[in-house]
Image: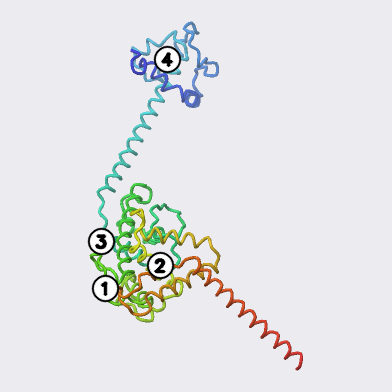
Amino acid sequence: SDYNGGSNAARQRKQIDPEIDVLDERFREDHQDSPLPLATIPVNSNNPDGPAMSPEVVQKLRAMTILDDEHFNQATPGAPISFLVLKEMERLQIGDSSHKSNSNDDHTHRVNGEATKTKEFTFSTGLKDRIRDFTKQALLRSDIDAYTRGVYKPGTSDLSLLTITMKSLEKLPDDYRKDAFPPGYKDDPTARKALVSKVRDLQKRVRLSMREKLLQNIINADGDTIEDAVVPDLHMLMNSIIRFLHSDEVSMTEDEVEEKNTPLYRVRIGYMRLQTLHHLLNKPLFKQVSQWDLIDEKIHQLKTRDTDYRAAWGKAIISRDQLIFGHKRTFGELNKGDIRLPNENDVQAKLQEIHRKRAQVQASHASTSTRRSHAVGHS
């Protein structure tokens, strides 16, 4: 029947045709020492009047085929050599196809098996603790360029919170990763995706805790404002956050805390508190925009500016923080009109200040050099 794809013979020919030349060549190589006159076989001939084969040739060919007696008798003697060659090719191809199918089935079962194992995989408490610790360690850096990146694959080289954490996980000992990571993590995209998803999920919770620290004595656990507690100044806030982000708060000495309280990190934390509080008091039009999205956007903008501009922006952040939080006042006592981010005028004022001080230093150096030259000349 030709219904739904034609006759069986037609479907078989369609199956054989794409590899006919390869199989023909393989057949010739396998039987190059055969008495069959392969060099003169009209492989593509379908002429029913083609030359009949001698009994000796038929016997030799019979030994090479897997046809039963009935089908071999139907095919020979008198059948064109091309028919038998095609039958042999069909046998070889069907065998190869069967082998490939079995291999594909094995691969499919293996992949499905790994996917099933990944789906049923439970992350250990130990691994989740490591993910949180690596995330906190990354949050101690002042050069993170994205806190909310959601995509990671081996070879990613940015300085996002996700990438830094994933690279730390990938440096763990092989034996530990084999036991703690989802099965097949090294080669199976599904397993890698599961780990990245777990890291992102845990990082959301760490960022939430970080937000609570940034809003210390401003917002309580229920989201209500705290009106009667002194809001920490930037130095106190820094020390509190550094201890929180350290894997073992108790083990940190005052000197160790102060060592991590660097000028660049001070600017980063000062900005993060300002942006978070401003976001709280001035909800964006789109609710899905978080303060972390705004922080990432500002970092991206600053990366396009020169060093002097970034330094001026940092000075503007510190000045704004000092104005708002530098007087040991409660949130209820704060002037809410002061709670804003530095604008361009603020930054430009700091930029002019940087340029003015630099010019003064250069003039001072030039004056000193001149005096020394005069002193040498009079000596």
Label 2 SS: loop
Quadrant that contains the C terminus: bottom right
Please identify, in this view, whether the residue under mark 4 or under mark 3 is nearer the observer: 3
What is the spatial separation of the Cα atoms under label 2 and label 1, in whole angstroms?
Answer: 19 Å
Q: Residue at x 37, y 75 (%)?
A: 325
What is the spatial separation of the Cα atoms under label 4 and label 1, in whole angstroms?
Answer: 104 Å
Instruction: Give the farthest residue toward the bottom.
Output: 379
The residue pinned by badge 1 equals 227
Amino acid carrying label 2: it is Arg
Instruction: Give the farthest residue toward the left.
Output: 222
Sequence-wise first label, 1 or 3: 3
Please identify, in this view, whether the residue under mark 2 or under mark 3 is nearer the observer: 2
Give percent across and percent down for residue 149.
40, 56
Quarter of the figure with residue 363: bottom right
Q: Nearer the viewer, residue 62 or 308?
A: 308
Please identify, in this view, whether the residue under mark 2 or under mark 4 is nearer the observer: 2
Q: Which mark is residue 125?
A: 3
Q: Which mark is residue 182?
A: none
**Above or below, 372 relative to 316:** below
The residue pinned by badge 2 equals 340
Q: Residue at x 34, y 77 (%)?
A: 252
Quarter of the figure with residue 101: top left
What is the spatial separation of the Cα atoms under label 4 and label 3, in whole angstroms?
Answer: 72 Å
Q: Nearer the viewer, residue 57 or 152?
A: 152
* Tag 2 near tag 1, CB within 8 Å: no
Q: Which mark is residue 59?
A: 4
